[in-house]
Image (spheres, helix red, strand yellow):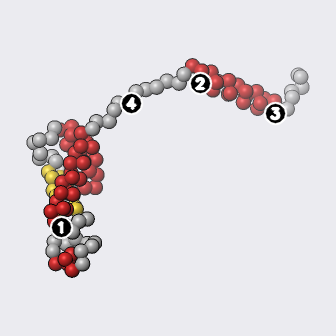
Amino acid sequence: VRSSGPGGQHVNKTSTTVQLRFDVVGSSSLPRWLKHRVIKIAGSLATNSGSIIIKAKSHRSQIQNKKEAYKRLIRIIKKAANRPKQRKKTFPTRSSIESRIHSKRKHSEKKKLRKHPTRDD
């Protein structure tokens, strides 16, 4: 596959673009939970068959593009290996609850003052 970008005539003559294909589902080195996360994080790079296709064409030489594609694959796997921390439920403090209720009361009193007086008053 031909690359675009800098390189002049060299770009037109040589195929320096690299496509790295990694079969995530068929890989025996990754645990099952990690396979699902890798495919999820890869997003549009993942295929329906459970593979990841990474294209690298930013460098002028094929060797540098191979290194770049490999680095991207490692970055995706490392990102998938970091499990997100469980969110701890937090509760509002007593003072924040009291201040909220106090402001609601003040607001309701303000609205009550806007009403027309009744005949009983």
Front tag of 3 and 1: 1
Front tag of 4 and 1: 1
Q: Please give the label number shown on residue 96.
A: 2
Q: Amino acid at mark 3?
A: Arg
Residue 99 percent across, percent down from the top left: 64, 24
Contact between marks 2 and 1 (CB within 8 A): the answer is no
Q: Please give the label number shown on residue 30.
A: none
Task: Looking at the image, tell me whether mark 3 or mark 2 is earlier in sequence order.
Answer: 2
Residue designated by label 4: 87
Front tag of 3 and 4: 4
Q: Please give the label number shown on residue 61.
A: 1
Quick check: 5 above or below 70? below
What is the crowding at mark 1: few (fewer than 14 residues within 10 Å), some, or many (at least 20)? some
**One can see residue 120 in this view:** yes
What is the crowding at mark 2: few (fewer than 14 residues within 10 Å), some, or many (at least 20)? few
Residue designated by label 3: 114
